[in-house]
Image: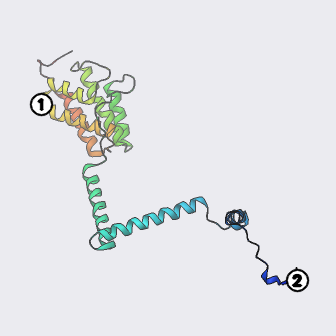
Amino acid sequence: MMSTGGLLITRADTPPVTTPREPAQEAAERELSKPMYHENDPGLLDRALRKFLTWLDDLFDAASGATPGGALGLVVIALLVALAAAALWWRLGAPRRTATSAGHLFDDGIRSAADHRTAAEAHAAAGRWTEAVQERMRAVVRSLEERTLLDPRPGRTADEAAAEAALSLPAHAADLRAAARTFDDVTYGGRTADADTYTRLRTLDLTLDRTKPLLTGPTA
């Protein structure tokens, strides 16, 4: 209790001490920013993962709400899409590159047809069918060059070799085109060869080696 000019002022009548709002907020933020208050906070990766899972959950809820049958219907549709994609992959194989026949047939030094056949047989014996098919196709083309049915031309593609060889070996034109496509598929298109693929190409090689060309075909 205080006395001022004969008036008594009790302590309860004293105006309370107040702090302005902005300084109080800044003081609270400084206090809460201390490391002691954040020791158990989740890490950055954990927070990002939680946000992603929340987003994924919201997306799934929205999709299931718009799909007949709700969540079960959405799962059924997803399974059908996955099965359709698997069926297309099995039927068509790996996607081909845009230009499957742009690469050169020979990518190393000059070797004889016999050398390529030996390499092909070695790959086949080891079960490396893709490499075996590549070497056998090179053997086919090199053999035709050695017989002067094709001119030895660097940079020739498998398709070009098949088209040129078909002029003097018209009875085997379709087989030559098929062999060129097979070479392109396994070399540039991501396909995987197998034993049957190699056997067909080996048979073509041996057959062409015994076939007499048309005399009117190009010899140079």
Mark 1 neighbour class, 10 Å CA radius: few under 14, some 14 to 19, many 20 or more = few
What residue is shown with label 1?
171
* SS at mark 1 in the image: helix
Check the picture and name the quadrant holding the N terminus: bottom right
The image position of residue 181, as x and y in percent, is: 24, 37
Decide which of 95, 128 is in the foreground and name it. Answer: 95
What residue is shown with label 2?
6
How many tags in the picture? 2
Task: Give residue 140's quadrant in the image.
Answer: top left
* SS at mark 2 in the image: loop
Check the picture and name the quadrant holding the C terminus: top left
Please give the name of the residue rendered at 26% of the width and 27% of the height, measured from the top-left corner: 141
Amino acid type of the residue that numbered disc 2 sits on in the rendered structure: Gly
Outermost residue to the front: 5
Decide which of 31, 49 is in the foreground and name it. Answer: 31
The image position of residue 20, as x and y in percent, is: 70, 66
Residue 206, above or below 168:
below
> Mark 2 to mark 1: distance in Å?
133 Å
Task: Give residue 187's quadrant in the image.
Answer: top left
Can residue 212 be seen in the rendering of this structure? Answer: no
The image position of residue 53, as x and y in percent, is: 47, 65
Please give the name of the residue rendered at 26% of the width and 21% of the height, measured from the top-left corner: 145
Please give the name of the residue rendered at 31% of the width and 44% of the height, measured from the top-left corner: 191
Task: Give residue 217's quadrant in the image.
Answer: top left
Can residue 87 be seen in the rendering of this structure? Answer: yes
Q: Is residue 32 left or right of residue 139?
A: right
What sort of colour scheme is used for the picture?
rainbow
Amino acid type of the residue that numbered disc 1 sits on in the rendered structure: Ala
Q: Is residue 56 left or right of residue 130?
A: right
The image position of residue 81, as x and y in percent, is: 28, 61
